[in-house]
Amino acid sequence: MKNDLAIWHDPRPPYAYVQSDGRVRVRLRLALGDERIPTLAWSDRQDWSGPDATGSMRWLEDDEHYRYWEGDVMPYEGRVRYVFRLVGHDQRVAWVGESGVTATRPGAEWPDGYFHWPYVQPESVHHTPAWLRDAIGYEIFPDRFARGNPPVAPEVVRGWRGKVTHDSHWGGDLVGVTDHLDYLESLGINLLWLTPIFRSPSNHKYDTADYGEIDPQFGSEDLFARLVRESKSHGIRLLLDGVYNHSGMRFAPWQDVLANGSASPYWGWFDVQSEPADPAARNYRTFAHTTHMPRLRTANPEVQAYLIDQAQRWMRMGIDGWRLDVADEVDPSFWKAFRREMRAINPDAYFVGEIAYNASRWLDGAQFDGVMNYPVRRALIQFLAPNRPVTGAPPPDDRLDAAGFLAALGRVRTWGPDWAMPAMLNPLSTHDVPRFLTAMGEDVRRWRLGLLFLMTYEGIPLIYYGDEVGLQGGYDPDSRRPMIWDPEQQNADMLATTRQLTALRRQIPALRASGFRPLATQHPQVAAFVRGNERDDASGEVALVVINAYDTPVHLRLALRGTAPALLPRWPEAATAHDLLGGAHFTLTGGTLDLRLPALDAAIIVPD
């Protein structure tokens, strides 16, 4: 089936971007049923009559409607022009260039109808820190994780259990985090994200009063320095939460604006529609629809200089990067300057933006390494949630079967360059959404499948504090209940499962490599995919992951060899299985896997 209306290419990220070796990687989208095979032709864009070099393209992803291909072109003196060639079974040829789909190759004139990449320089090359491939993350909401002994701020301490409200303080502090680094290390955690820790009147600290001071309820700069040192001694890197879209009501420049109006030297720091700024009228832009979080004008050079100066202090103390709040509402010029100045201090720093939808415009190599992968979380919930109304889960008529789940993953994966995939932060739960166990209707078996997916998928798996011991919670503020530390109240099986799966991720190289290939099964609720990529992963490691979302056992046969885009070119005859419940059984004969899986179970098959 040919559908030329589905064909798409845009000569900018994520459809074109520079690789570390100077090549330009390009992508082409075709209709899912389009069987034509694309190849590439390219040449020096300043030599319009010169001969073209040619090269093949590789299957990249499928989603619900499209098939994506990718290939590389080599610039000449930092520039290149390229065109796509489509050949069908009938040997008819079509060309895809800037002029659209044509029956003839673009002519040798200027402008010539090719796509162009005019400028490749060293600064065009983007890299994400190599350590991200081995990272397993953990999010802590400091007020709710643990109190030091003695607590830093005894005046805010209350009983550790009880109902959480928007305004309640529970007394968790930085000493409590430091005291539990052994626990985090035992979980397999090596990347710790702290939600904001700077001075603020709230429990969540997203309404910053002072970007240069640790909140006294959490501790002091000395206690923070101790946390940084001891985290490193445990092999744990530290991310801080940067809140630069808005400040809080007690932020000194905002107080000056309230007091002095347009006479304030900080008047241009905020977006005030009329004078005076009036919280009762909310005649200024804010975060969401609050009155106490005035929005900063992040394109203002003075604002940029101030915020970057404050952030540099904490980078110099040894943190490893930033999770950046409400990143999509901040001026891009700020993120480019922020990244440049932070990388000058730590060339291996990690920057992840809070963006909950297609973030391709921020994954241009000049802003973020990755973003919080909420679209993958949503697809996982649509696939695994029980077929009944559950807090935090979509309604039953908005669920995905295995094919829909894998297609959704393919669609999301096309939103970013390949260098961004290892840098995506993949959560099951966070402080902003219901707990995953709650969204699974409190079914630990479904939670277990979700965690296995997280530990086998490309990107950084993120555990929200307490998920590993059965902490539940609905929408904010219920998702921010205090940590369960009493062993009698913890779910020991969930804790053991978490340790088992983080260990498997560390043990199996393919689970940390690039690459993701879906495999079709004959069961609508069984999702199978291959992790690892023989093209990009020098070790050639691969692993097959099979997830049974049925309430009943399944028996399936999978062909692991073939020529279709989603199949591996080869698979050895011997393999080892790792499964959650211990009841999986398989045989491997002639490249065909015969697998029996218990209900709501999963297996990881690794070639010997």
Image (tube, helix red, strand yellow):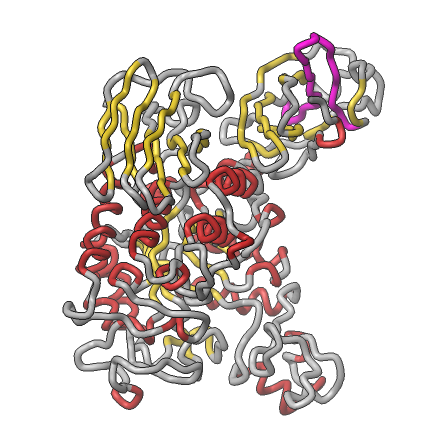
Query: Is residue 163 left or right of 241 when viewed as pictured?
Result: left
> What residue occupies the far front of the structure in this picture?
552
Query: Horizontally, is 498 left or right of 238 in the view?
Result: left
Vertical placement of residue 104 versus 464, above or below: above
The location of residue 388, given as percent across then percent down, is 45, 59
Figure disc tally:
0
Q: Quadrant of the C terminus?
A: top left
- Which residue: 21% across, 47% down? 500
Above/below status of 155 relative to 405: below
Residue 4 vertical position relative to residue 250 in the rendered view, above or below: above
Point out the stretch of residues depicted in magenta.
Answer: 77-98
**In this rendering, would 341 be left or right of 487?**
right
- Residue 85: within the magenta? yes
Tell me where residue 552 appears, x and y as whole percent: 32, 43
- Residue 315 visible here: no
At x 61%, y 69%, the residue is 302
Of the 4 image quadrants, the one containing the N terminus is top right
Q: Residue at x 59, y 49 (%)?
A: 358
Judged left or right of residue 608, residue 95 is right
In which quadrant of the rendered view does residue 258 lie? bottom right
Nearer the observer, 5 or 364: 5
Q: Residue at the location (40% across, 76% down)? A: 213
Q: Quadrant of residue 467?
A: bottom left
Q: In the rendering, at what x and y percent does residue 291 appear?
A: 60, 82
Query: Could you tell me residue 449's position as x and y percent?
Result: 33, 47
